[in-house]
Image (cartoon, grey):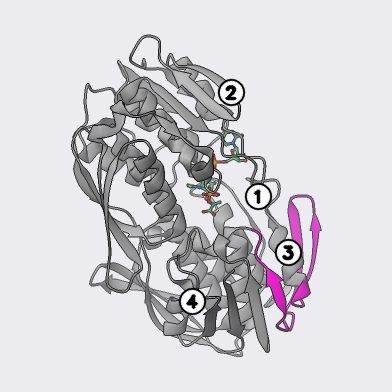
């Protein structure tokens, strides 16, 4: 099993390009099932979740041609769903178990083929993560759904889903995406209220629009979708990964240095920029060749101030950056309180940070961190994707050698993280020889 070995204490300096967003790419791949023509997706990050999602589509009968770019961080995939209807319409457990986003094929399959069998993804390290909001909305649209032997078995007796006026009882990124996709081919006009507003949903809506969907209210909490009879193909580039960008910002804030992030959308990472700015980091935005560039500076020896933060749906502070910020706060002077409000079990990195020397306490959904702490390298174990990134950041700070084990979690969502960090001067090596 691969692990990362890090020699800490070296500031990060240089420039790094942000890859396409995993969490935008996953629903875009699922949306290819809706197209009556091939769909080309660019800037897919070369991570294992993307390969798994493409395999899920192939298992459903989709043709996929995938190419990797030269540095090996991104993929371009052409997906042709022409053969899907003749197959089993079954997303099997052995693929789905590694990745929760595979539930996103349910809405498109029901909308286009009136039938689907999708394995329930199962419990996950960060919380229970039910899919009731997805299923309730699809039932209201006319689907008949049963859970049988761990599979969501669903069909649409009327042949076509019908439009609904629906208020999500809770803000859910995945449920908004699933029902948005389903509504594109439903009969009539669907209104989705209390919809999630994450930029990844805006990107999915942009792709669906390119395919011929009629969507109003993009980037707002109320989406209005006028169902159409068919969608075509498209050539779509997914947005840059705001969580990868935020992870690099946290790495520089914690380990100090001066880094230019290329291909970022600062407006989509405002909450992390604001937080790190209040901690004492300095930011400069400027035009780059491929969108905006963002420079972050924290000179070595410059003190960080401890700040409090609570996670919230977008435009609030993302839960997917909560763990990385905890590593930053171990280096800040004073007490910081981090509240996790989205997932009930997303503090597993805290124990491993303590093993590196962090001074913190967990109380339910709250973490209290007293800093700054001198971290010392040791072997730590990654428990989930963002927890892994945190341990890498802590390893960059810690004196001596840190080994991060179980990095298959990291490989789900970061394209070449260790190579990108090496480019910034970090001493970090992958040991074990596995390939993503
Ligand atoms: C692939 C992807 O994009 N993953 C992101 C997506 O996950 P995901 O789409 O799974 O997260 P949701 O927004 O759905 O989850 C938000 C909250 O709603 C709850 N819930 C969700 C669905 C449901 O049917 N019932 C229910 O109770 C969840 O348990 C959680 O407490 O958004 C999360 C919240 O920003 C991010 O952390 C994940 O990185
Ligand atoms: C939790 C995450 O992903 P997923 O929803 O795929 O588990 C994440 O990207 O941080």
Q: Label 4, on which residue?
A: 418
Closest to the camera, between mark 4 and mark 2, is: 2
Dot placed on the residue nearer the N-terminal end, 4 or 2? 2
> Please, what secondary structure does the residue beneath circle 2 have?
strand
- To which residue does mark 2 refer? 148
Residue 280 seen in this snapshot: no
Does label 1 or label 3 sit earlier along the sequence? 1
Please provide percent x and percent y for residue 85. Answer: 30, 27
Say whether disc 1 or disc 4 marks the residue closer to the N-terminus.
1
Label ID, residue 350: 3
Residue at disc 1, CB closer than 8 Å to ligand 2: yes
Residue 339, quarter of picture: bottom right
- Which is more toward the observer, 10 or 76? 76
Q: Which residue is mark 1?
A: 126
- Structural distance between the alpha carbons of marks 1 and 4: 24 Å
Q: Nearer the viewer, mark 3 or mark 2?
A: 2
Horizontal side of residue 363 vs 145, given as left or right:
right
Q: Is mark 3 within 8 Å of ligand 2?
A: no
Q: Is residue 362 left or right of residue 80?
A: right
Depth check: give the residue in front, 392 or 255.
392
**What's drawn in magenta, residue-wise?**
355-383
> Mark number for residue 79?
none
């Amino acid at each position: 099993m691969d692990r990362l070995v890090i020699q800490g204490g070296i500031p990060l300096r240089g420039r790094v390009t942000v890859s396409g967003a995993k969490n935008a790419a996953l629903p875009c791949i699922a949306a290819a099932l809706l197209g009556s023509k091939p769909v080309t997706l660019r800037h897919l990050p070369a991570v294992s979740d993307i390969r798994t999602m493409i395999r899920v589509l192939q298992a459903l009968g989709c043709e996929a041609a995938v190419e990797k770019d030269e540095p090996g961080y991104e993929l371009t995939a052409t997906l042709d769903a022409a053969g899907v209807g003749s197959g089993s319409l079954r997303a099997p457990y052995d693929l789905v178990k590694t990745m929760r986003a595979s539930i996103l094929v349910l809405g498109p399959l029901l909308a286009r083929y009136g039938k689907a069998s999708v394995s329930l993804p199962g419990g996950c390290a960060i919380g229970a993560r039910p899919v009731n909001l997805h299923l309730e909305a699809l039932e209201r649209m006319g689907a008949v759904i049963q859970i049988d032997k761990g599979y969501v078995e669903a069909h649409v007796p009327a042949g076509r889903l019908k439009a609904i006026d629906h208020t999500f009882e809770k803000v859910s990124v995945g449920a908004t995406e699933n029902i948005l996709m389903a509504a594109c081919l439903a009969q009539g006009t669907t209104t989705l209220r209390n919809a999630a507003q994450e930029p990844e949903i805006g990107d999915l809506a942009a792709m669906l629009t390119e395919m011929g969907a009629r969507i109003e209210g993009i980037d707002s909490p109320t989406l209005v979708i006028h169902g159409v009879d068919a969608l075509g193909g498209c050539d779509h580039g997914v947005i840059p990964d705001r969580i990868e960008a935020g992870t690099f910002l946290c790495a520089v804030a914690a380990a100090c240095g001066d880094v230019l992030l290329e291909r970022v959308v600062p407006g989509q990472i405002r909450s992390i920029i604001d937080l790190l700015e209040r901690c004492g980091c300095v930011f400069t935005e400027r035009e780059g060749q491929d969108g905006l560039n963002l420079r972050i500076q924290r000179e070595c020896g410059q003190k960080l101030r401890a700040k409090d933060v609570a996670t919230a749906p977008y435009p609030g502070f993302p839960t997917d950056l909560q763990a990385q910020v905890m590593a930053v706060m171990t280096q800040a002077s004073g007490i910081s309180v981090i509240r996790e409000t989205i997932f009930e079990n997303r503090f597993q990195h805290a124990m491993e940070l303590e093993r590196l020397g962090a001074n913190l306490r967990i109380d339910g959904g709250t973490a209290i961190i007293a800093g700054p702490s001198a971290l010392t390298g040791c072997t730590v174990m990654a428990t989930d994707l963002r927890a892994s990134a945190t341990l890498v950041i802590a390893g960059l700070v810690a004196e001596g050698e840190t080994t991060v084990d179980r990095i298959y979690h990291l490989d789900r969502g970061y394209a070449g993280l260790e190579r990108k960090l090496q480019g910034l001067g970090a001493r970090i090596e992958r040991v074990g020889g596995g390939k993503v």
